[in-house]
Amino acid sequence: LADLEKAYKAFANKDYNRKVDQRVSKVMLKAYMKEVGKENRPEIFTLIDKKFDGNIDRFVDEAFKTSIFGSDENFNKFMKKPTAKALKSDLMIQYAQSVIQKMIDLRKELKPINEKFALAKQTYIKGLLEMNPGKPAYPDANFTIRATYGQVLPYSPSDGIDYHYYTTLKGVMEKEDPNNWEFVVPEKLKELYKNKDFGQYAMPNGEMPVNFLSNNDITGGNSGSPVFNANGELIGTAFDGNWEAMSGDIVFEEALQRTISVDIRYILFIIDKFAGAKNIIDEMSIVK
């Protein structure tokens, strides 16, 4: 019981908001059901179908209402009179156990695949080292702090095609597709664009910058890295590489390799004008 109480306090600490968790749980579970077929879901979804007629909202509401983790009152009541029966029937515990069991099952299924992948990776790395004998090779520096440097640059992938070094909000509007979640443009953002209400974040020509290119190297795991200028000022956040940089893990193409970063002016614009979180802006030192 002491371990359970310790775990509960770590879970329901001062930063935990049950109302937010409850709302997010409903959205995430519905999204999961939409993307994953019945045959591949954890067993808890069978219970949701039978006891709650597949209604995620009802399941989540009942879990937060009755689970010992649903409220301080529920937990304290359980601690005064703990029983194994209460734990066994607890919806949140059943959910957690179901997810853990599915993870175990998936790991078993993936084990032979991962073993083949590990052997193939050895051959792959051996080939990389033999391609350029005696020359430095990229280290596997994932999960470590590292830094690189480069320049903001455009590029030309082929004859007659030139890509500018930055994009603007105009391009976001041009790519709008309400039927594709990746290209849905919120109405408020459309309104800000229509009114040219960019605040202090627009470029001198009045356009709102969104992304920019640099000849830095980027690979999986680099997303979210800060991009600084020569003065140590944050100018953006790296999140992707261009199509022509797909071979970057094998060879660095100097003329084609580009990192795509979100312009810090667009980030500030979204925080300030779109989200209305000016209190966050007021806490920053913005260099103009």
Image (cartoon, rainbow, N blue to C red):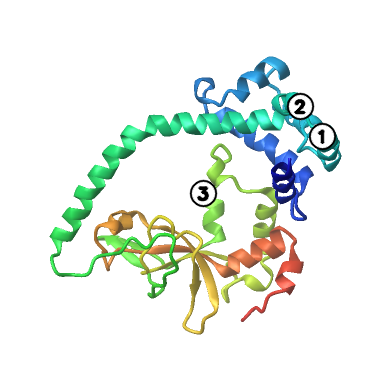
Q: Give the residue at x 75% y 61%.
A: 276
Pointer 2 local density, CA inside 10 Å: few below 14, some 14–19, many at least 20: some
Q: Is residue 215 above or below residue 243?
A: below
Left/right of residue 104 with respect to residue 111 in the rendered view: right
Q: Closer to the observer: label 3 or label 2?
A: 2
The secondary structure type at the circle numbered 1 is helix
The secondary structure type at the circle numbered 3 is loop
Residue 22 lies, in percent from the top left, at 74, 39
Q: CA distance from mark 3 to mark 2?
A: 53 Å
Report the front residue among 134 and 267.
Answer: 134
- Residue, disc 3: 175
- Residue, disc 1: 78
The reply to whether residue 35 is visible in this rendering is no
The secondary structure type at the circle numbered 2 is helix
Residue 98 lies, in percent from the top left, at 59, 28
Quarter holding the N terminus is top right
Q: Give the residue at x 70% y 32%.
A: 92
Query: Which disc, if any, is residue 86?
Result: 2
Type of the residue with mark 3: Lys
Q: Closer to the observer: label 3 or label 1?
A: 1
Q: CA distance from mark 3 to mark 1?
A: 54 Å
Quarter where residue 117 is shown: top left
Report the front residue among 174 and 227.
Answer: 227
Q: Give the residue at x 70% y 52%.
A: 188
Q: Are marks 1 and 2 in contact (CB under 8 Å)?
A: yes
Q: Is residue 64 above or below residue 243?
A: above
Left/right of residue 206 with respect to residue 192 in the rendered view: left
Report the front residue among 36 and 81.
Answer: 81
Q: Give the residue at x 38% y 33%.
A: 110
Type of the residue with mark 1: Phe
Query: Which disc, if any, is residue 119?
Result: none
